[in-house]
Amino acid sequence: MTLDRIKRGQSFKINNIQNENIRVQAIRFGIAEGEWLTCEEVVPAGPIVIRKNRQQIALGRQLAKEIDIDLN
C-alpha cells in the first residue's frame, strides 16, 4: 500500500522509499524507512499531513504515492 491511500488516524510503518531523491527529502524531515508514524489529516485534493512525535509534516499526493507503507 502507498501513503496516498491512508486514512485519517491510522498509524503506519514506512517500508520502502524507492526514489533516492524522495528518500533524501524524507530523511531531512527525520522520516526514515522502518519508522512508525500517524496520519493526522487527509486534505481532499490536497496534502496528507503526517505526525512523528509532535512534529507535523504535509506531503503532497505525488510524493505520498512513492512511499510504501504497512498499517499496524
Image (cartoon, helix red, strand yellow):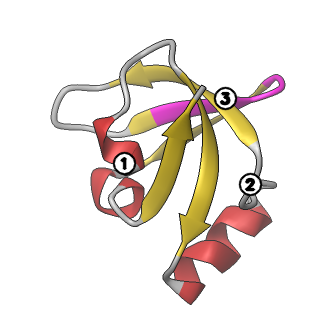
Disc number placed over residue 1 in the picture, else none: 1
Instruction: Give the side of residue 40 with respect to residue 66, left or right.
Output: right
Magenta stretch contains residue 72? no
Residue 50 included in the magenta stretch of the image: yes
SS type, badge 1: loop
Q: Residues within 10 Å of mark 1 (few under 14, many from 20)?
A: few
Few, some or many residues within 10 Å of mark 2 (<14, 14–19, 20+): some
As helix, strand or loop, the secondary structure at mark 3 comes to strand
Amino acid on which disc 2 is placed: Ile
Q: Which one is nearer the viewer's eye here, 25 or 33?
A: 33
How far apart, in angstroms, are the residues tagged by discs 1 and 3?
18 Å
Q: How far separated are the C-alphas under marks 1 and 2?
A: 18 Å
- Residue 46: quarter of image: top left
Percent coordinates x, y for residue 19 in the rendering: 49, 83
Badge 1 amino acid = Met
Q: Is residue 48 above or below residue 65?
A: above
Residue 10 location in percent, x, y? 51, 19
Mark 2 or mark 3: whose residue is earlier in sequence: 2
Which one is closest to the eye, mark 1 or mark 2? Answer: 1
Mark 1 touching mark 2, by CB under 8 A?
A: no
| Residue indicated by mark 2 | 31
Q: Amino acid at mark 3?
A: Arg
Q: In the rendered structure, which segment of residues is drawn in magenta?
A: 49-54
The answer to whether residue 9 is left or right of residue 56 is: left
- The x and y percentages for residue 65 are 33, 59
Give the residue number, with chain letter if any, for mark 3: 51
Residue 55: give x, y in percent of width and height: 76, 31
